[in-house]
Image (tube, rainbow, N blue to C red):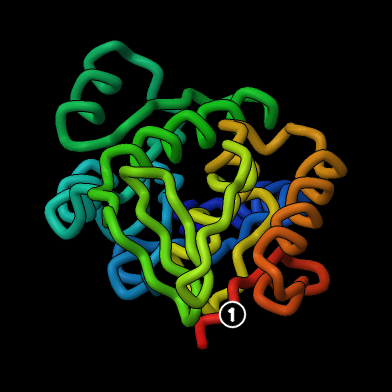
Amino acid sequence: MRILLVEDDRRVAAALSSALTRRGYEVEHAATVEAALSAAPCDLVLLDLTLPDGDGTDLCRELRRRSSQLGIIAVTARGEERDRVLGLRLGADDYVVKPFSMVELQARIEAVLRRTAHAAPERNLIEAGLVRIDVGGRTVSVAGRPVTLTRKEFDILVSLARQPGVAVSRDRILLDVWGTTWADRHTMEVHVGSLRGKLGDPTLVETVRGVGYRLRGE
């Protein structure tokens, strides 16, 4: 999961970046509107509304214009009701007033990512190499052979198959399947092990050390 942190206070940005990285997110920092607009694509933006080269509300409006699926959380000292209402009307999914705890911010990030994931159109048929998934019918086949999976195993496979050949973080899988990044990772590993066995080829789901898992795309 990639987060763009738009924050002009270097100390605040460093502390937030460190905390988010420890939680498994990939973080890019932008200290200005210009840097934010030229940043790489991301899953969610944490947006300070007070920036040195422009107003964060204008940036929020532009980011929302570029993508209706992007998660945006305004993180700011502006706590007045009119500021919160304006931020939400301009396209922010949520509004967090400084100071805040990382527990609160983590919960809000998870909630926004769940909403944006559910809002994204889901392909009904996914094919990744020998693996064929009918998402609506919740059926799976490997090289034409039907495979019976539990609900969790199926959801893990879909989470990986959305990006075949790409390493998917454990936090992304937990969020997709369990709805939180605080779920038991050992339980997830057990489900992944069972999934590998049922697919018939353990190398189809590869472990990416320090990141998560990858579904072989060929």
Q: Is residue 204 left or right of residue 92?
A: right
Residue 77, how many percent across, how many down? 46, 28
- Quadrant assignment, res 152: top right
Q: Residue at x 58, y 61 (%)?
A: 27
Residue at the far front: name it.
145
| Amino acid marked by disc 1 | Arg
Residue 143, how many percent across, how many down? 50, 77
Q: Residue at x 81, y 68 (%)?
A: 210
Residue at the far right: name it.
186
Q: Residue at x 40, y 37 (%)?
A: 73
Label 1 neighbour load within 10 Å: few <14, some 14-19, many 20+:
many
Please say if 8 is above or below 151. Answer: below
Residue 207, how many percent across, how many down? 77, 71
Kindly tell me whether residue 20 is visible in this rendering: yes
- Quadrant assignment, res 50: top left
Instruction: Pick the residue in front: 3 or 169.
Output: 169
Residue at the far top: name it.
81
Q: Which residue is mark 1?
A: 216
* Quadrant housing the N terminus: bottom right
